[in-house]
Image: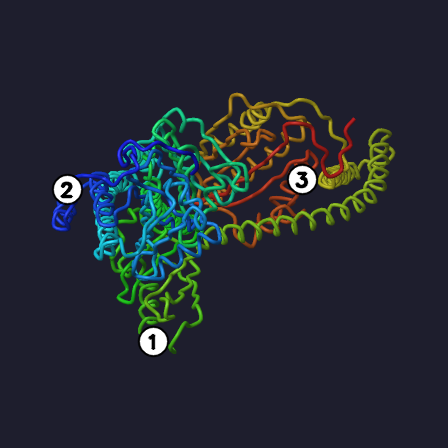
Amino acid sequence: MSGDTRTRRLTRPSDGKAPTGTATAPAVLVSLLAHTPRLTDLLPHLHQHALDVTGGTRSLLFEHNPRNGAMQATSGFGLEVLHTDPWLPAADEAALVAAAFAGRAPLLVTDADRQMPDLAGRLDTRAALLFQLAHGTDRVGLLAVGFAGPVSATSVRHEAPQVADAFLTALELCRLRQRDELERDLRQVFDEFSESLSATLGLAAGLDIFCHGANRLFGADRTSVWIHDRRARHLVLQASSDADHAARDARVDADDPLSPVAAAMRRARAETMGGADATVTSTVTVPLRGRRRALGTIIFEGVRIEPGGELDLLDRADELGRQLSGAIENMQLLDDVMRSRRELENTFDSIAHLVAVSDRRGRIVHVNKAFAARLGRAREQLLDQPLADCIGPELAAWLGELSASVRPVGPSEPTTREILDPTLRGPFMVTVTDLLNNERDRVGSVIVARDLTLQTQLEAEREELRRRLTQSEKLAALGQFIAGIAHELNNPLQGVLGHLELLRTTGAFPKPLRRELQTIYREADRTAKIVRNLLVFAGSRRLERRAVSLNGVLQKVVALRASACRAADIEVVRHYEEKLPRVSSDSLLLHQVFLNIVINAEHAIASAGGGGRIEITTAVRPTKDAVVATVRDTGGGIAPDVLSRLFEPFYTTKEVGQGTGLGLAIAYGIVQEHGGQIVASNHPDGGAVFTVELPVTPAPGRRSHDR
């Protein structure tokens, strides 16, 4: 820190003569040391004593700056001007300074204007007496006494070495007092900082309080704290004693060599920038450094430094930086631990399987959210509860066997078992793994239960889809086969019917054969209808598509079978969706589909003993792309071995002569031709359910022949 400052307290005008007045006795100095709290009040007496003992006319006290090895002039006596810029002795001067520190006795330089011109210029004398101030090899400072005229070693009084001891004692005593005062002030600042951290567990609020306290402590215009964001390689303004300044959310590149904030973070100790007299303020930068990384920077702006007080201020700033660095690093470590714990807890709770951790006593240490939710209890209520009380008896017995079994030292392989647990409500694949401590000793168990309900449902659905696909492929192949046979039968059959019709018209046959001829015609016509039905099943009939109301078709079917249902004591219940969209279909064929289904339902109810209910429901599929019609009866249901063959042609469970086995086969073919699907199943409460899905928009069927 450069610049000349005229001292106002520690110098007096020099008249070239020795100072007059009563000499300061050693006993008086001891009393002053004990009762004078401020060094600035004590130094004039020490300087006067030094001049009295040595016979000098002026004196200058330098304090050693351990940061750069320079000598900093901090006080003087009898000088016109106190030069406070650092004294960096040249080679010749440095040799004499080293000689002064090498010996216990003062070093007299009679021709200082030639050997030590810089020092002679500061003292404005030709001769100088140098007193070393040191603790062993640690330099504390240097006292230089100047003489107006010639001087010899014999003219210096024998108690001159005690002068250095008095200055050294005063400096050390003052530093101890200042350290106590600093610790007291810092304790107050950090007490407020700690209270904020404890209350909020947030660094930002605590740093705001710290900035205001440190601002008062250093008498600065503004104090700000910049925190290093290692990921972004930025220094972020985290807090400031100036609220408007902190609200700007300023950022500085951590590698910017022109930024004082970034440059200060890379330094080892506090430094000042700017002037240092009573009318000029300085900026003090303090690096914040942790044990392993740089944490940020403290910036004090507008600090007023008293002449000679820079070293003391920088020491205070360094101490403040060290304590704040420790607090910030601890908070960042705490944040890292808490963030890691939150991530682990979130990961733990994100596991869909049921997870429980128990100790060696079998008591719950931790459970995830899925486990607590399955039991319908809060997680806190489960902690330290016996795990056996929260699971089914089979699982508890198995865990007890594993715990009691003799296992080798160290971790063992995980054990897995499939269990149906009534307490956890479902089938589970349970895996038990040892819980290990840092020494790899077993201290408990980790139980992971994977719910198999969804997997079982998926497997059942997959099996049902596989069964449907197999049935569809089988019926498709059967349809192609039947279509070929039907076409081959239809041609000669139409010839037979044509000739029979000709015989009936012309009467060219013996009258005794009339009845037999009618029988032949009736059976041939019945055979032709069977062939036509087979062609419908095979998809060979052309569809007459138009917009059809499914509710209307069902209403006609119900009206047609109303009398038969009343006679059989069957109640027909209808649940129609009022705003059911129309389907593009052949209404006559749809009528045939639902007529066959309703007649089958009547037969099923009659087979179960008579009297029952048929429920017909229509709705729109949630995806809005199809309408769904269900017909449920209260009959005896469908046997499992019958379900797989229900839609096969000529397959029937009725007695001989009561059915051809083509009704449901024809219904299947018609629905497939419309691009829909028909499914038969058993209702959980009894009876059979037929579900027909038809697309709302026209969709090509298996072999559509739309006009």
Of the pair 123 and 606, the residue shown nearer to us: 123
Is the residue under label 2 in contact with that under label 3 (CB below 8 Å)?
A: no
Q: Amino acid at mark 3?
A: Ile
Q: Is residue 562 left or right of residue 299?
A: right
* Crowding near the residue tagged with mark 2, few <14, some 14–19, many ≥20 C-alpha atoms within 10 Å: few
- The residue that disc 1 covers is 405
Q: CA distance from mark 1 to mark 2?
A: 97 Å
Of the pair 590 and 368, the residue shown nearer to us: 368
Residue 405 seen in the current view: yes
Is 153 above or below relative to 609? below
* Crowding near the residue tagged with mark 3, few <14, some 14–19, many ≥20 C-alpha atoms within 10 Å: many
Q: Quadrant of residue 257?
A: top right
Of the pair 61 and 317, the residue shown nearer to us: 61
Q: Is residue 321 left or right of residue 54?
A: right
Q: Is residue 349 left or right of residue 694?
A: left
> Which dot, 1 or 2, sits closer to the camera?
2
Residue 219: give x, y in percent of width and height: 30, 32
Residue 369 seen in the current view: no
Name the image quarter holding the C terminus. Answer: top right
Q: Is residue 135 left or right of residue 115?
A: left
Name the image quarter holding the N terminus. Answer: top left
> Which dot, 3 or 2, sits closer to the camera?
2
- The residue that disc 3 covers is 666
Mark 2 lies on a secondary structure that is loop
- The residue that disc 2 covers is 22
* Crowding near the residue tagged with mark 1, few <14, some 14–19, many ≥20 C-alpha atoms within 10 Å: few
Q: Amino acid at mark 1?
A: Ser
Q: CA distance from mark 3 to mark 2?
A: 137 Å
Residue ID at (55%, 49%)? 461
